[in-house]
Image (spheres, grey):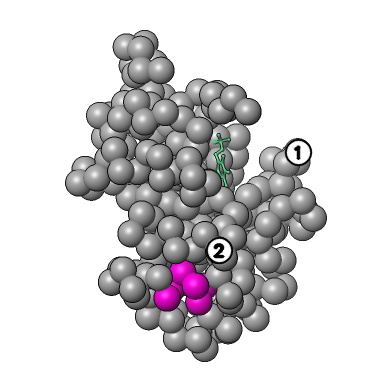
Amino acid sequence: MSTPLAVANIAANLARLQDRIATAAARAGRSAESVHVVAVSKYQPAAAIAAAVAAGQRRFGENTVQDALSKIPHFAGQGLEWHFIGHLQANKARHIPGNFTWLHSLDSLRLAERVARFAVDAQTIVNALIEVNVARDPHRHGVLPEQVPELLDQVVAAGLSGLMLRGLMAIGPHPASEMEIRSAFAAVRKLQESCVARHALPAFTELSMGMSGDFEPAILEGSTLVRVGTAIFGERPYPVA
Ligand SMILES: *Cc1c(COP(=O)(O)O)cnc(C)c1O
């Protein structure tokens, strides 16, 4: 739990991560400020999140509603930004607005409509990223790259006032060579550019790509939101079944 050692590690890990991000951004000719860290705190105790907050971290990512809702209220009023990064069933959509301001896993019109409806009720707006299954992995969620334009068209046509389309999210192929990883992330960036051209969406600027093992190639290919867990918090203490 929150031993002084673990807390010191989290601060040191965050500092080291920021250094690596700055180096990768410089290599890409980008500013370090153009890359935001979403600290993936899934299955981590609130004390670990508190340590990251004390070290200046503001954006956090969770992948299950149940785990997230047990922790988010502890941090009310501290100005944190919560990102839902896991697969979301439509029947859990009501938990997003009010708890999370970002949804990284939009994969259907039905989910968009439900999240947007609850967002309007809660008088808030959810920033949504369409999840792309760029690795074409049948065990993964998200829509295939060629299905993105159709989903985008549907969501735009629905005119959902509670939902703002902000970009794309992808999980890199694994296992894969550095070159395969980069070309997958590059394909997502090209897809994002084609989405912007298709609908003139001024806010469709974000690319959520890169995790502990592949955030550097993701930054080289334009990632603006890296979702990093293990490199900040260490191995996850999986809940005892
Ligand atoms: C768990 C998770 C991450 C973080 O993975 P690490 O390898 O621990 O950095 C990022 N994105 C998603 C969607 C995840 O589920």
Residue 104 vs 160, above or below: the answer is above
Residue 119 vs 4, above or below: the answer is below
Mark 2 near mark 1, Cβ–Cβ under 8 Å?
no
- Residue 83 placed where, x, y %? 43, 51
Magenta stretch: includes residue 9 = no
Q: Secondary structure at mark 2?
A: helix
Q: Which segment is the magenta one?
A: 112-117
Q: Amino acid at mark 2?
A: Asn
Tell me the crowding category of disc 2: few under 14, some 14 to 19, or many 20 or more residues within 10 angstroms, Cα based: few
Mark 1 sits on what residue? 175
Q: Residue at x 49, y 49 (%)?
A: 65
Quadrant housing residue 11: top left
Quarter occupied by the N terminus: top left
- Residue 9 placed where, x, y %? 39, 18
Residue 235 in view: yes
Whole-angstrom CA distance, mark 2 to mark 1, is 33 Å
- Residue 46 placed where, x, y %? 36, 31
Q: Secondary structure at mark 1?
A: loop
Q: Nearer the viewer, residue 77 or 134?
A: 77
Horizontally, residue 123 falls left or right of residue 102, namely: left
Q: Nearer the viewer, residue 225 or 193?
A: 225
Tell me the crowding category of disc 1: few under 14, some 14 to 19, or many 20 or more residues within 10 angstroms, Cα based: few
Q: Residue at x 77, y 51 (%)?
A: 139
* Label 2 or label 1, whichever comes before in sequence order: 2
Q: Nearer the viewer, residue 107 or 179?
A: 107
Horizontally, residue 181 falls left or right of residue 59, namely: right
In the picture as drawn, the residue positioned furthest to the left comes out as: 77
Mark 2 sits on what residue? 91
Horizontally, residue 238 falls left or right of residue 27, namely: right
Residue 15 in view: no
Quadrant housing residue 55: top left
